[in-house]
Amino acid sequence: MDAIAVQRQIRENASTLQNYYSDLKDWEATIAKKEQARSTSTKKPPRVRNAVAVPVRGSAGSVSIQHPINDVHTPAHEPVAKAAPASHVYDTGYKKWDAFDVRPHGPSTGAQEGGRDQGCAADADNLAGRARKSDGNMHFKAGEYVAAVACYTRSLGFNPRNHIVLSNRAMAHLKLKEYIKAEQDATLALQYDSRHVKSLSRRATARNALGKHRLALCDAEAALALEPTNKTIALQLKTTREALKTAVKRTPSTSIPVTVTVAPTVAPTVAVAEPPAVSTNEAPTAPTDKLPLPVAAPPSTKLTRPKIKVLVPTKAPTTSYEFQRVWKSFQHADEMQQLRRTYLGRLQVALLPKLFKDAIEPDLLLEILDALSVEMDANAVALLMHLARVPRFDMVVRFFSGDERQHVASVLAQASAVEGCDAAALKAAYGV
């Protein structure tokens, strides 16, 4: 399973867990509302049934015999206490419940319990994520990089935005020589923390392995700017520069098919004179040097440049790959610069930052400037202004040499002659 599928699964798991907590919170709020409505209702408690007087045995003409032990002698000076009517114990209990206010105790309790439950769940997720991260670190130290990647992936299931775990997984991918996945994880970690030095260094390592030496150089310089005293990053920056120089030297020149015409030639005949006979009576003479024989001239070759017809697409490119594919197809045409200038006129100026993103390099930028210099008009000036808004453009112009900067300055001077051109802004953007 690739990294994109794993990240998608992590997002789905996090979304499911969040929906579960939302439903639980809604349920608790509903229960609290019901309790509040029940406690504040105006419904009165049921009345106590009136006591029915039961005829006492012996009354109403009945004959009763009073036992002497049951006689209660009350002194004459003490009044006889009479029971108050409706003084039953249940009446007093209902009156106490009427005076009890349940509102301060109902909803707040449910809310506190809900917050406590959510806090406990978040703490449990953090603990589980840290435990998986620790397991991944142990596997990494033991050299078990596949198991380390699995543990880091499970840790990201609890917190997908943990840039440290993403950077650690990128390092494990580097050990497994999975450089594309390492670059993706390091890039994702830098989205959450753009100043994480280890992520910059690890992405530079992955890009060097993929042959993206210019982008790797940008990452190494950014990391060294954050930690100027880091000797490891300084060494990595030096190695990246050497790799970039080596890659430029080893770049093969593009082969062009040629037609060779060989003129028929006839080798001239050379007459060789026989040496004179030497008599035996004469003294021997010193040997003479042999004269070189005339060599026939090499056949003349006539190189003809092939004629290639290239059509300019009428539709503007939507991706950087499509633009570069068409751009390189013009390099063998007779009118290369004119075709490239026409193709640049097809571009939507406002979408240049979205088209190139961070894929533009110094060589491509110089070729674009050369093509724009063929016909400098308002459209070319707009292209120059919007090219400066491409991400990491300031890092690209730093790779220009002294001669290249002079060439850029000449193109900008040509653009400053166009009406409405802000020459100062252009020079500031291109660093000249």
Image (cartoon, grey):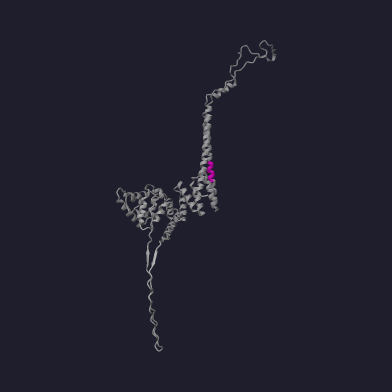
| Residue located at (31% from left, 53% from top) | 414
Residue 384 appears at what percent x and percent y?
35, 50
Q: Quadrant of residue 231?
A: bottom left
The outermost residue toward the front is: 264
Q: Can residue 359 be seen in this view?
A: no
Q: Is 58 covered by the magenta stretch?
A: no
The outermost residue toward the top is: 61
Q: How many labels does the image show?
A: 0
The front one of 397 and 78 is 397
| Residue located at (51% from left, 41% from top) | 15
| Residue located at (40% from left, 56% from top) | 329
157 in relation to 109, above or below:
below
The front one of 238 and 376 is 376
Determine the main secondary structure of the stretch shown in magenta: helix
The front one of 154 and 352 is 352
Q: In which quarter of the image is residue 260?
A: bottom left
Q: Is residue 129 visible?
A: yes
Residue 192 appears at what percent x and percent y?
46, 46
Q: Is 124 covered by the magenta stretch?
A: yes
269 on left or right of 199: left
The outermost residue toward the bottom is: 281
394 in relation to 116, above or below:
below
Residue 137 appears at what percent x and percent y?
53, 50
422 in relation to 75, above or below:
below
Residue 360 appears at what percent x and percent y?
40, 52
Magenta stretch in the rendered image: 122-130
